[in-house]
Amino acid sequence: MRRSLVAAAAILAVGGGLCLAGDKAALGKPAPDFELKDVLGRTYKLSEFKGSVVVLEWINQDCPVWRGKLKFLNETYGAVVAGKAKPEAPVTEGATAKVVWLCIDSTNYMTPGRNHAYAAVNGIAKPILMDAAGTVGRTYDARTTPHCFVIDPQGTVVYDGAPDNSQSARSGSAPVNYIALAVESALAGKPVATARTNPYGCSVKYKS
Amino acid sequence: VSPPVAAARPALRRTALLLLVGAAAGCRPDERVSYPTKPPLVDLAGLNAAIAEHRGSVVLLDFWASYCAPCVKALPQVAELGRQLSPRGLRVLAVNRDDPEDWEREALPILKKLPAHLPCVVLEHGSSDAAVSQFGKRWRSELPARFLLDRSGAVVREFLAEATEAEVESAIMELLAR
């Protein structure tokens, strides 16, 4: 019985993203480790980026809200990552980066080919990791596209929420880029002032 | 350009009240009541005022947006539920989360195609976090999100993305039978 349970767990792990820690993600706690393949089949393991600030961004090219934020997210990526490393490089090179940005797609029906093509057409330089089984998405309780997390160099979740305040600010308020602020604080070793916001957008289309 | 919410704030409650006065002034739920061409923008106080008008009824609050495919797919059934169960004490209030400037172009065409009139307000972005705190236990503003309020106005059920239409309907029937 026990052996078959282990075998079942192994099959589950092979079938989708592999979550290596049992706990759910929580603010102020160690980010659960995971291993996912990108659209080209390269393996990314979160724990290999320890020492870097890591941004996780949940995506879905079929979600108009995420598509509407594409320019903002690409620009923010450029601002926080540019000149510091090549996060699209294989894991061993990426591990030396100060800031690494990983897109994760937990849409149950999405294919690597569609994301590869979409990234090429829309100038997305960030690696896109495939999580069609939804294992990693559910571990992080990713609700929407876009939903973002920032992990500090020690591997602690320091931000969980929306990329910006565009859907929660009163009309006329100044725009706030939550990701850029969290990354800046994490790089400086300071607490993130706004560590949790409500993510907005389409719900993640998990496998039922 | 966003409507000047701050300047219009005193009008927000009035918008909600006008909507409800329309509903209370003898409009049968199956009448094709026209929708306003300007977004019926409310803040949280306005939304609460709209809900309070239905005290004594079971209320289904349906947060939706034109970009949310599952929300749009479910709207006809929600409108039908509101129409058919109105005599038994159900009131449905749709809360649109599109950008207010998208009301006429995106939200209105969807509402006009519904099989029954669905009272709908647009919640201003600045009230988003407060609405999440007030209505949700697990909710973090993702859509679809539906909340069932009992006859005293208390939230008794929360239906998020994974909820099925059958679950929502069954909970409504159960609450109406109490």
Image: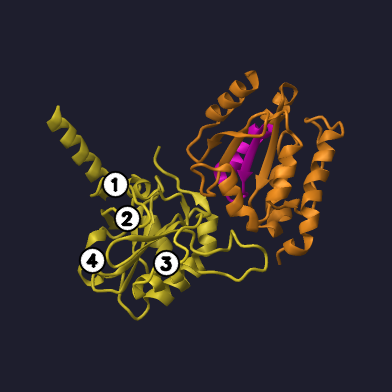
Query: From the viewer's perspective, is residue A46 above or below residue B16?
Result: below
Q: Secondary structure at mark 1?
A: loop
Between residue B142 and residue A36, name the one nearer to us: B142
Whether residue A185 appears in this view of the structure is yes
Pick the front one: B160 or B77: B160
Residue at point 72% right, 25% down? B89
Q: Residues within 10 Å of mark 3 (few under 14, many from 20)?
A: some
Compare marks 3 and 1 and give the one earlier in the sequence.
Answer: 1
Instruction: Say which label, 4 or 1, has the lower sequence index.
Output: 1
Callout 1 amino acid:
Asp
Task: Name the front one of labels 1 and 2.
Answer: 2
Q: Disc 4 vs disc 3: Cβ atoms closer than 8 Å?
A: no
Q: Which residues are magenta?
A: B59-80
Three-letter code, disc 2: Lys
Q: Which residue is mark 2?
A: A29
The quadrant in which residue A189 appears is bottom left
Which mark is drawn over residue A23? 1
Q: Which mark is residue A91?
A: 4
